[in-house]
Structure formats: C-alpha cells, structure tokens
Image (cartoon, rainbow, N blue to C red):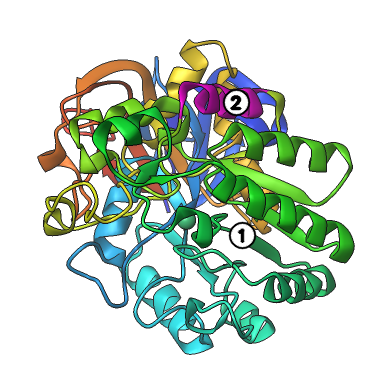
Amino acid sequence: MSGLLLRAGRVVDPARGLDATGDVLIRDGRIEAVGGRLDGGTKVRVLDVDGLVVCPGLIDMHVHLREPGQEWKEDIESGSHAAVAGGVTTMCCMPNTEPRLDHAAVVMQVIARARAVGLCDVHPIAAVSRNLEGRQLTEMRELARAGAVAFSDDGMPIWHAGVMRKALEYASSFGFLIIQHAEDKQLTEGGCINEGWVSTQLGVHGMPAEGEDAMIARDIMLARRTGGRYHVAHISTSGAVALVRRARAEGLPVSAEAAPHHFALTEQEVMAYNADAKMSPPLRTETDRQAVIEGLADGTIEVIATDHAPHHVDDKRCGLSCAAFGIVGLETMLPVSLQLVRDGVLKLPEMIAKMTVNPARLLGLAAGTLAPGARADLCVFDPEECWVLHRDKLRSKSSNTPWHGKTMTGRVKYTLKDGRLVYRDEGAPDVA
Ligand SMILES: [Zn+2]
C-alpha cells in the first residue's frame, strides 16, 4: 500500500516531548516515521501542511452520543462526523442512554456500531449503578470485559456514599477509573443556572457551588480510604479545584477534567435567558473561571473534555427553567481551548497534552501519540485561522451552542483515522 507524507508541518507530540517542524510518514494505517525531511519513495502521496500544526488525533473523554434511545438528538454516526470535524479521533461516551450502558450487551452494541461507522474510535464509559439509580452496583468486571474503559453515572451523580465507597473499592482492586458528576441534588434541586447575582437578577433558582464542592470533598475522603482512582468530570468551581489540588498534593489517585465552556465563559452568558448557555454544572462566576484556568495551568486539571451534550431545539426553546442541560462541544473544543495558548496560560504542547496523551494515560488507551508504530490518528489544524461559527454548519444533529455567530480562532483542516483522511475542511487542498 502506498503511503502518505505530511510535508513540513509543526509536529507536536507531547507524549514524546516533540515540537518541531518536519514531516510525518504514514503507511498501512500507522506512523512510520516522524521528523526532519522524509522520503517516502515514489509511490507516496503528499499533503503539504506547511504552516499547520500536526498533532495526535484528539481524545474527548466525555461525550454524550445519545444512541441508543435518543437518536433524534445525535447518533453514533452524526457524533462521529462532529468528532472528526473537531479533530477528535477517539471519544468516550457516557452511559445515560436508553437503555443505559449498564449491561455488557449494550456496551458491545455501541462499540460495534462505532466500528461500522468507522470514523472515530468510541470507548463506552459504563454505568456505576444499575439504571443510574445510585443504589446497586453494575457488574463492573463484565462491563470492562465488554469494552468499557471507565465507570460513571454521568448525567446523574453517584449520590449514595455507600455505593461510591463500594465502587471505589472495586476500582482499587481492578484498576478501574470512577468518574463523578459531582452534584449534591439536595442542594441543586430546582436550579437551572449558577446560584448568585445572575440567578437573582433573572429570578430563577440557582445551583450553588457547594453542591459540587461538598460531593467532591466526600468522594476524596472515600478515595483516601479505598485507594480507588477517582476522576472529577467537568470541574467548575474554585472550591472544587482547590480540593482536587490538595488531594493530588497528598498523593491520592485523584484527577479532573475541565470543559471548554467552564474556562471560556461565565454565568453572564445566560443574562439574556440564553438556554444555549445552560448546562450542568452551570457556567459559574469569573472567580471560578479563573480558578479553573489556574488549575489547568498548574496541572491540577490534566484533561480538557467537552461534555458534548446534544439536544433538540425543542428541548432548548422552552424557557430557561425548562430547557435541557447541555451544549454541543466536539466541533468547538480546539478553537476555544487555543485561547489558553494565546493568553499564555498553557504552551501549545501542554494544551494538546490535555486532549491527547493525558486522557490516554488516564484511561489506558493505545492512542494520543505519533510515535512510530502507533496508529495514524492525526489532527491537522491552523492555529491562526479566524472564522465565524454558524450553528447550521455543525456536523452534529444538534446545534445547541453558545458560540453561534462568534468568531473562532483556530480551525481543523484535516483529520486522519488509521491513516485515512476522514475529514477535510472545505477549501483545504486535497492530497496530491
Ligand atoms: Zn455530567
């Protein structure tokens, strides 16, 4: 099989500390060589990527694909198209589907469906508790054997302390990762946005930061007792960042991810009753946003993940209080995160690490590097290109995004999966 040569890009592979201009040679779906000026022979096809960044295909470890059960919002095929348009070649999907990902058969069905679509690797995150009810543990080992890479009740918190303790004990024995949607529902009941000045102005119920902080504090104590690996999903408060920082300093197996909206936006976004800025946890205050940025900068927060949560327009255009929680994120993760680099918070390789090698290591995935021999999953992007996001142009079936009409900087030009070009930006030159 003839190879493909990516010519003269800025190659960034944080897994190997590489950031240099050079070529990438791909053959038989794998990386053959990286760096310098490479000669692929006469049969090799060439893609000129001069001026573009070439990095491992992005990994998004927090996605809601809605299949099975809510395919009018998204399905594995449309979600895969959205993923590769965002430079994502590996994603982990959350278990709050219908039926839930709480049985091995459903987990295997999702994996098989994703393979049939063949655009993006999909690794299910299976439920911690049956039907996400938080009362009875699932058969976690069986789910892991079926292909689940981690466990969460996301959409819902693992609210029951005894169940969380047991889950972490299991996690400790078998090396599983428990991912928590930290929300004390007794504190957030009836809330639709952050509790504070904006919720008071709008006259709607708020969700206090303590709802997130209290549950994480409890969970960290349980992680300390059990030794189980614990991961905070979509961290959003200054209190939560401080708790995770302290736990990690203590050497506990605690990690966290932040979603782009939580480090790019604040509760001010919902001032115009904008339901496309309603998600859970909600957009918080500027102090919280700065704390999340600080956590990303000092390594407290290892991972950037989208919490891609597609909803039909009917679920959003029904008033702020009634609207569904969540926004789509796969196609905006990269440009929104690049702002961290422009602001000097992270160097480009540090930012890329948080969406490639870091989640790969956390989940034990064979992805997230351009090492010779690795599967040729790549994202090629222009870090400077400015463009205006239009919701109708999103590949996702849903268009619930707060960035509609906003100017984005940074654009994915090509995405390769196993050496195949699975996405090419309109207007970008084709392979020669
Ligand atoms: Zn969640």
Q: Give the x, y percent position of residue 370.
A: 59, 39
In the displayed structure, would residue 326 be above or below residue 335? below
Residue type beneath disc 2:
Ala
Tell me the crowding category of disc 2: few under 14, some 14 to 19, or many 20 or more residues within 10 angstroms, Cα based.
many
- The quarter in which the N terminus is drawn is bottom left
Residue 416 found in image quarter: top left
Report the magenta residues as a range.
285-297
Q: Secondary structure at mark 1?
A: strand
- Provide residue 278's location: percent of width, then percent of height: 31, 44
Is residue 103 toward the left or the right of residue 364 in the image?
left
Residue 408, compared with residue 391, is above or below; it is above
Residue depth check, mark 1 versus mark 2: number of the one nearer the observer:
2
> On residue 179, which mark appears?
1
Image coordinates for residue 201, horizontal then vertical, percent: 28, 30
Label 2, on which residue? 291
| Mark pair 1, 2: CA separation | 21 Å
The local crowd at label 1, few if under 14, some if 14 to 19, many if 20 or more residues have their Cα within 10 Å, is many
Please tell me which residue is depicted at 63% across the width and 45% down the height of the picture: 213
Dot 2 falls on a residue whose secondary structure is: helix
Position of the C terminus by quadrant: top left
